[in-house]
Amino acid sequence: MKLKNTLACLAAASLVLQPVAALAADAPPPPATAKAPVGPSAFVRCDGFPNKASTLGTVARLVAITAVIGLLLPQREAYDPKKRENGADGVKACDEALSGAEPAKDGGRRIELIFGRAIHRMEMQDWDGAIADINSVSTDQPDLTATLAYKQSLGLTAIELRAMALTGKGDFAGAHALGLELANQAPFDIKAQLSSLQYLALARSYGPAEMVVYDQASRAFPLALLDRAAARAVDGRFLEAASDYKAFSDLVGSIPKARGYPSLARSAIAYRLGGNATEGDKLLKLALAAAEADAAQGKTDTPVTAANEANDLYAILVALDSGQAMRARTLFSARTRWPTISAGLVAGVAARLETVGTAAERANTPIPTAKEVLAADQARVAAQINNTGDDNSDRFDTYRWAFAQTDFGKFAANVWKTDKSRYVTTPKKDIEYGEFVDTSRNGTGTPAGYALLLHLALLTKARGHSHFMMMPAQSTVYRGMFRTGTPGDGKVFAEMAYDPDKVIAALSPLIPQPVKK
């Protein structure tokens, strides 16, 4: 699951003077004329951005962390990713921007250019060179990379780019570890949480460290609960996976016109794999009834298809549990892919079938082993990470805006105002979809996302409720639908809900309550 974060362009103007031809001694020289350079600058050819003042450098100067002297004010250019060079030409452009005749002087801009060079090395599959570049920013800008402003912005970019490079290199365990680091460095940052999940999926496990991250991600973005269920299934925690699938199905079922029965069917599979056939049978029956009702209305879309696919896998488990072992193996061997079922569930079925029958019977009904199922899923995840989109946009979109700690103060008055909230709109009807919250009146970016969570935590307490949760498919960090309530009330689900006391304890130091004078 991914969120785009495209940086806007800041530019300043100057003129580049061209040489003037020799003149006759008795004629006064004409005034020099300024001409714009031909073609895009090295900066734009490196990463698509002109030689601008970086947000990191600007923030650092505002809080007097470092000073940037003699910042070059370049010929005005516009952001244009189409003009980025690729591979070796990109590396050459970045080298020129960093060390040429007119190198970047803004510290934050230099870090961006170094990251751009690393990305171009990745295009050449020079993974070690890319990692060396990323690591070199602390040498190029030691003071700036030691700041909180860096760690909250381009420092997260550095972690994610290293994870991408390790993925390309095939070091999936290393990428997994960086996914944990990325999530833990910004536990209330929704983008960091979602970005981390793809790296955790490269080497799935569900130990204490992973538990923390999956819990964080599931609260930040409820769809991530399906990632936690998938990780639990790989780890053989089928009953816990079943509970996650059921919780997500219940959430979707509480939203008008939404269809959560595919997750209900997956929950049924996990329950039977975990030894609770009674619960599995009950949930599958409910899921199939909902799918059949949709089919009767002429619907043949993904939810219907997914429920039917889950039913096919469930039938294999029923046959196996009924003593029809070879029939179960034959049914499994007849299908090559289970695209809507998590690899952990498919591997769980494969593991039970691996030793079924005689050697000759197994030869006649070839099936992938559980290990092969998981390896194929790992390769799929790696391919998704390595497929970086048009113009390498997924790698360049990891660039993050820096923000000053003083930016939080813009939100303080409205964050702490829970009576007649200026951020929350309660619909007069269809409240089942949730209430609407938007903090952008005071700013955007990461501070706005933190303000949103703190405001909802305070609002929850003011209402006398125990939890709040964001609704699925939030599109920006500062705007979305939410519910407040108590787990078990059919509106708020513990697996995806925030404890307001914990949110207030973590975020109120950043946005303290204004003191009345």
Image: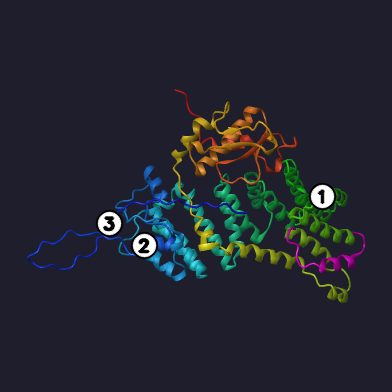
* Residue 437 in view in this figure: yes
* Residue 510 in view in this figure: no
Provide the secondary structure element on which disc 3 rests: loop
Label 2, label 1: how many angstroms apart (C-alpha)? 58 Å
The tag earlier along the polypeptide, 2 or 1, is 2
The tag earlier along the polypeptide, 3 or 1, is 3
- Checking the image for residue 443, the label placed there is none
Marks 2 and 3 in Cβ contact (< 8 Å): no
Residue 41 in percent (x, y) is at 36, 62
Identify which amino acid the numbered label 1 is placed on. Answer: Ala
Quick check: 11 left or right of 349? left
The tag earlier along the polypeptide, 2 or 3, is 3
- Checking the image for residue 287, the label placed there is 1
Identify which amino acid the numbered label 3 is placed on. Answer: Leu
* Residue at mark 3: 15
Task: Tell me the crowding category of disc 1: few under 14, some 14 to 19, or many 20 or more residues within 10 angstroms, Cα based.
Answer: many
Provide the secondary structure element on which disc 1 rests: helix
Give whichever of 129, 286 is nearer the camera: 286
Label 3, label 1: how many angstroms apart (C-alpha)? 68 Å
Residue 11 among magenta residues: no
- Checking the image for residue 41, the label placed there is 2
Identify which amino acid the numbered label 2 is placed on. Answer: Ser
Magenta segment = 321-341
- Is residue 157 positioned above or below 89 on the image? above
Quick check: 155 left or right of 44? right
- Rendered image coloring scheme: rainbow
Task: Tell me the crowding category of disc 3: few under 14, some 14 to 19, or many 20 or more residues within 10 angstroms, Cα based.
Answer: some
Quarter assignment of residue 347: bottom right
Provide the secondary structure element on which disc 2 rests: loop
Residue 32 in percent (x, y) is at 20, 60
